[in-house]
């Protein structure tokens, strides 16, 4: 059974969760964005499967659309922002040593979670 968690920016669904990797389906609502964050214990690979987004990855800020992907190395500050009029869907693959939600360091957040 998959696990879905609603957030102020949209939702995420855990598709696979094992000791070697975790796969999530992120849905970012129009004109919303996740917090500017980093992780100490994991890397992330994102594939845009629907919508148009702006992604911050370290010092880079770039627009991405369907079929484009990006690698977020452990420790890099990153953020997804939906710049389209429809939901943006991203498949996230986490690799590393730990995948808990408490491995999030927030730097900026539209929802006062810093």
Image (cartoon, helix red, strand yellow):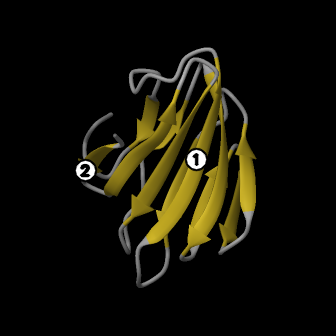
Element carrying mark 1: strand
Could you say which quadrant of the image residue 100 lies in? Answer: top left
Q: Few, some or many C-alpha atoms within 10 Å of disc 1 (few <14, some 14-19, many ≥20)?
A: many
Q: Position of residue 82 (x, y in %)?
A: 47, 69
Q: Quadrant of the C terminus?
A: top left
Q: Residues within 10 Å of mark 2 (few under 14, many from 20)?
A: few
Question: Could you tell me which residue is drawn at 30 percent across and 46 percent down?
Answer: 4
Q: What residue did someone put label 1 on?
A: 92
Q: Residue furthest bottom?
A: 85
x, y percent for residue 11? 33, 54
Q: Is residue 55 left or right of residue 14?
A: right
**Is 86 drawn above or below residue 22 in the view shown?**
below
Quadrant hosting residue 44: top right
Choose between 99 and 111: the one closer to the eye.
99
Residue located 38% across and 74% down the image: 30
Please tell me how many numbered marks the rendered image carries. 2
Q: Is residue 59 visible?
A: no
Element on which disc 2 rests: strand
Locate residue 28 relative to residue 113 in the image: left or right.
right
For disc 2, the marked residue is 6
Q: Is residue 11 visible?
A: yes
Residue 45, x across and y down, in percent: 68, 45
């Amino acid at each position: 059974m998959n696990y879905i968690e609603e957030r102020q920016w949209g939702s995420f669904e855990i598709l696979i969760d094992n000791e070697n990797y975790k796969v999530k389906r992120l849905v970012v609502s129009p004109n919303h964005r996740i917090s500017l964050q980093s992780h100490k214990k994991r890397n992330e690979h994102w594939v845009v499967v629907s919508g148009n987004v702006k992604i911050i990855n370290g010092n880079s800020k770039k627009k991405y659309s369907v079929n484009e992907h990006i690698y977020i190395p452990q420790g890099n500050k990153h953020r997804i922002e939906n710049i389209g009029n429809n939901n943006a869907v991203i498949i996230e693959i986490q690799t590393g040593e730990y995948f808990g939600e408490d491995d999030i360091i927030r730097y900026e957040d539209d929802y006062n979670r810093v």
